[in-house]
Image (tube, helix red, strand yellow):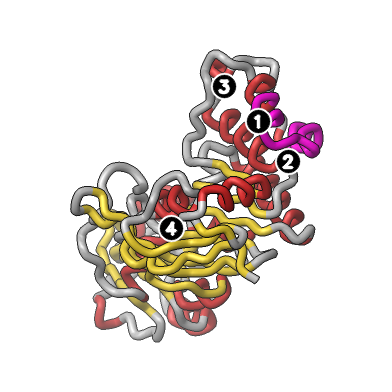
């Protein structure tokens, strides 16, 4: 069964296609990540699926309710939690008053549990909240009525690393309890920790829908390697190297060694290599073993780089103003 179905969804804002024939499904009981750079069209899709705006073409269902059927959508949204990007709470109200208002509309059977988990200062007025505190209040209101489906737009924005980890653990627990989670993000490393599948959108168009492990395998890692040698691009022969940049660093190995405290001097130039790597890491280590390695960093490939490497060059962004 599908908790969300999107079919040919198109949204045209005065000639600007924020969504262009978007289609995907979110299965019941899964955590689905909706990925794309800022301005890709994620928020447009979410607002349309939630029934806050009508599509120019196409349709969608939310818990089997057609977005064009207002009474059905009202009934369905009783079982849905929603966290928008940048929640706009009344600055003069306290967190307590905000939650009381939401409770009067949809219930709050999990309020105490969630306040304990996310540590929101509900006695204070919203104008005194930090960005992270507003986000945590938004998370409490989204989950406090124990919904079957939760839709979140950039849910970890403003959260510190410890709270992000707590949120990730919470989402995994919700999945084990059978809940469906749909969340947008522009951070690949974030969704890899909690999502079962991801849909990728760019310039309003769906690029792919696939499992997280499949995406990670195809996206590779971003590598920065500094060696005490003068290297040219043609000398980098390791399979799996993409988007290679070779640059002679404006320092000598002697300067690098002294800065590192080794006290040894050598006149060789330092070369910095940066690239996306999808190959076998034993091969990369074998290549590096032929040189004096000064520094080696391996990170998740940035999302934009994943798009460029595996899905081809994109047109200039067509969505205007924030994350349309």
Report if residue 307 lies within the magenta region: no
Disc 1 designates what residue?
A: 102
Which label's residue is closer to the chain start, 1 or 4?
1
Which label's residue is closer to the chain start, 3 or 1?
1
Residue 130 seen: yes
- Residue stretch in magenta: 100-117
Viewer-nearest of labels 3 and 1? 1
Q: Quadrant of residue 235?
A: bottom left
Viewer-nearest of labels 2 and 4? 2
The residue located at (79%, 58%) in the rendering is 177
Q: Position of residue 42 (x, y in %)?
A: 41, 54
Disc 4 designates what residue?
A: 264
Mark 1 falls on what kind of element?
A: helix
**Quick check: 186 above or below 133?**
below
What is the distance, in whole Å, between disc 4 and disc 3 at their CAs? 53 Å
Disc 3 designates what residue?
A: 129
What is the distance, in whole Å, between disc 2 and disc 4 at their CAs? 65 Å
Viewer-nearest of labels 2 and 3? 2
Contact? badges 1 and 2 (CB < 8 Å): yes
The residue located at (33%, 43%) in the rendering is 322
């Amino acid at each position: 069964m599908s908790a969300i179905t999107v079919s040919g969804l198109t949204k045209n804002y005065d000639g600007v296609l924020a969504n262009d024939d978007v289609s995907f499904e979110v299965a019941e009981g899964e955590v689905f990540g909706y990925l794309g750079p800022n301005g890709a069209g994620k928020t447009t899709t979410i607002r349309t699926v939630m029934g806050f705006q009508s599509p120019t073409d196409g349709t969608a269902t939310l818990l089997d309710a057609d977005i064009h059927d207002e009474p059905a959508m009202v009934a369905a949204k009783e079982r849905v939690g929603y966290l928008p990007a940048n929640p706009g709470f009344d600055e003069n109200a306290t967190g307590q008053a905000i939650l009381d208002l939401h409770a009067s509309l949809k219930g709050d059977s999990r309020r105490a549990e969630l306040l304990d988990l996310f540590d929101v200062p509900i006695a204070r007025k919203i104008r005194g909240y930090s960005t992270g505190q507003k986000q945590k209040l938004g998370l409490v209101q989204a989950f406090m009525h124990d919904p079957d489906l939760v839709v979140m737009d950039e849910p970890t924005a403003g959260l510190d690393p410890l709270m992000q980890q707590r949120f990730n653990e919470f989402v995994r627990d919700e999945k084990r309890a059978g809940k469906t989670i749909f969340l947008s993000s522009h951070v690949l490393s974030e969704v890899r920790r909690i999502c079962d599948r991801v849909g990728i959108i760019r310039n309003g168009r769906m690029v792919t829908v696939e499992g997280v492990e499949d995406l990670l395998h195809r996206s590779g890692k971003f590598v920065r390697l500094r060696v005490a040698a003068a290297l040219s691009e043609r000398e980098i022969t390791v399979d799996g190297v993409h988007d290679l940049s070779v640059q002679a660093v404006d320092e000598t190995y002697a300067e690098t060694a002294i800065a590192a405290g080794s006290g040894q001097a050598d006149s060789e130039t330092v070369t910095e290599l940066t690239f996306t790597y999808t190959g076998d890491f034993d091969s990369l280590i074998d290549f590096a073993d032929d040189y004096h390695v000064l520094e080696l960093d391996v990170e998740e490939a940035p999302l934009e780089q994943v798009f460029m490497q595996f899905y081809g060059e994109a047109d200039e962004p067509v969505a205007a103003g924030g994350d349309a």
